[in-house]
């Protein structure tokens, strides 16, 4: 073959117009090299199946990462879930070193604190998933830097978009196969979880006592998350937080169990009095399941997350 002619990958012969002979030879060698690489890659993929997206998920919050990992794994995404141990500063450095060695395409860091710092220090591409308490009361300089360098910022509740307007809202996922009604909630058992930033225990207990409700206010929960849906189904009304303008993940899980949820949209005393009526409970449950729950079904949330991963990769 003349030096000004080379063979393309399809097997046809073409003239290299205006290309020196030495350059043609280099092109030929380069094409043969790429052919070998492509053939090797094809063989490797045939051995292990098709290419799988690899995600390193760091830390968790309210079992959001736990649910996302389950949903992603079912869709063929390979997820390695890594957790912290020890003091936060040392743990962040240790995690950063671990992330440098992990085989992954993208890091998904839950919480814009130590997990985000570790992702940033790893030098790998990452997304930061904020869950509220990490950013709601202010951002320090390192958080801001981590957010600037992230491929994308995610927030778990829509009110957080006021703090991070360029972030994407990824609704908190609820596994509706597990969190589902096991009975009709016609009784008088009320469940309320106090928070470190909001504790209405006294007001809740007093109002419930006056209206004839039986109140449960757990301070510490040692119940495995795998059994939490059974625990929720023992109650008939759930009282969520009021100072934060969004539903908590537990409220969404109660909602999926068709338990009426009193939320930031409501007035506590007025709502508890109204929910003494079974008819009012059913109305509230139907509205919440029609307008709130569809955003949070695990399948829908995982669809949205996979779409984002594909855009970034």
Image (cartoon, rainbow, N blue to C red):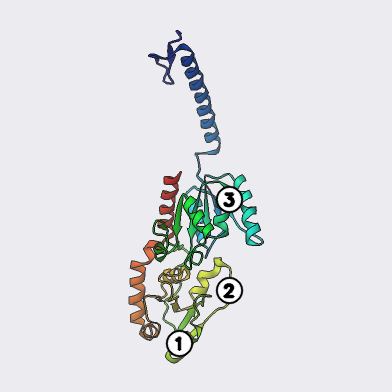
77 versus 23 height, above or below: below
Q: Looking at the rendered structure, which numbered label has been put on residue 80?
A: none
Q: CA distance from mark 1 to mark 3?
A: 50 Å
151 versus 197 height, above or below: above
Quadrant in which residue 58 is drawn = bottom right
Residue drawn 50% across and 69% down? 229
Residue 132 pos. (x, y %): 48, 66
Q: CA distance from mark 2 to mark 3?
A: 34 Å
Of labels 2 and 3, the one closer to you: 3
Q: Earlier in the sequence, mark 1 or mark 3?
A: 3
Q: CA distance from mark 1 to mark 2?
A: 22 Å
Question: Mark 2 sits on what residue?
Answer: 221
Badge 1 vs badge 3, beta-carbon distance below 8 Å = no
Mark 3 lies on a secondary structure that is helix
Question: Mark 3 sits on what residue?
Answer: 121
Q: Is residue 15 visible?
A: no
Question: Mark 1 sits on what residue?
Answer: 208
Q: Is residue 45 visible?
A: yes
Badge 2 vs badge 3, beta-carbon distance below 8 Å = no
* Crowdedness near tag 1: few (<14), some (14–19) or many (≥20) residues, C-alpha within 10 Å: some
Residue drawn 65% across and 62% down? 87
Mark 2 lies on a secondary structure that is loop
Residue drawn 50% across and 22% down? 30
Q: Earlier in the sequence, mark 1 or mark 2?
A: 1
């Amino acid at each position: 073959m003349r030096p000004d002619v080379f063979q393309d990958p399809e097997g046809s012969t073409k003239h290299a117009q205006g290309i020196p002979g030495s350059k043609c030879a280099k092109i030929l060698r380069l094409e043969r090299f790429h052919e070998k690489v492509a053939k090797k890659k094809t063989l490797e993929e045939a051995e292990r199946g098709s290419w799988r997206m690899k995600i390193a998920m760091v830390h968790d919050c309210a079992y959001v990462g736990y649910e996302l990992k389950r949903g992603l794994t079912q869709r063929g995404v390979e997820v390695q879930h890594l957790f912290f141990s020890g003091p936060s500063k040392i743990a962040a450095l240790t995690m950063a070193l671990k992330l440098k060695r992990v085989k992954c395409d993208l890091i998904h860091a839950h919480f814009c604190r130590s997990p985000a710092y570790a992702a940033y220090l790893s030098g790998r591409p990452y997304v930061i998933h904020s869950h509220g308490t990490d950013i709601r009361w202010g951002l320090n300089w390192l958080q801001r830097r981590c957010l600037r360098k992230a491929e994308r910022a995610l927030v778990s509740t829509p009110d957080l978009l006021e703090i991070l307007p360029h972030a994407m809202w990824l609704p908190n996922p609820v596994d509706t196969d597990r969190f589902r009604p096991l009975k009709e909630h016609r009784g008088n058992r009320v469940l309320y979880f106090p928070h470190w930033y909001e504790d209405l225990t006294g007001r809740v207990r007093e109002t419930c006592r006056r209206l004839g409700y039986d109140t449960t206010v757990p301070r510490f929960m040692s119940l495995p998350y795998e059994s939490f849906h059974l625990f929720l189904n023992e109650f008939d009304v759930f009282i969520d937080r009021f100072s934060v303008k969004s539903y908590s993940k537990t409220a969404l899980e109660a909602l999926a169990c068709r338990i009426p949820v009193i939320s930031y949209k409501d007035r506590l005393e007025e709502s508890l009095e109204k929910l003494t009526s079974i008819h009012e409970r059913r109305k509230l449950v139907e509205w919440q399941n029609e307008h709130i729950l569809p955003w949070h079904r695990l399948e829908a949330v995982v669809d949205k997350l996979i779409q984002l991963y594909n855009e970034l990769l």
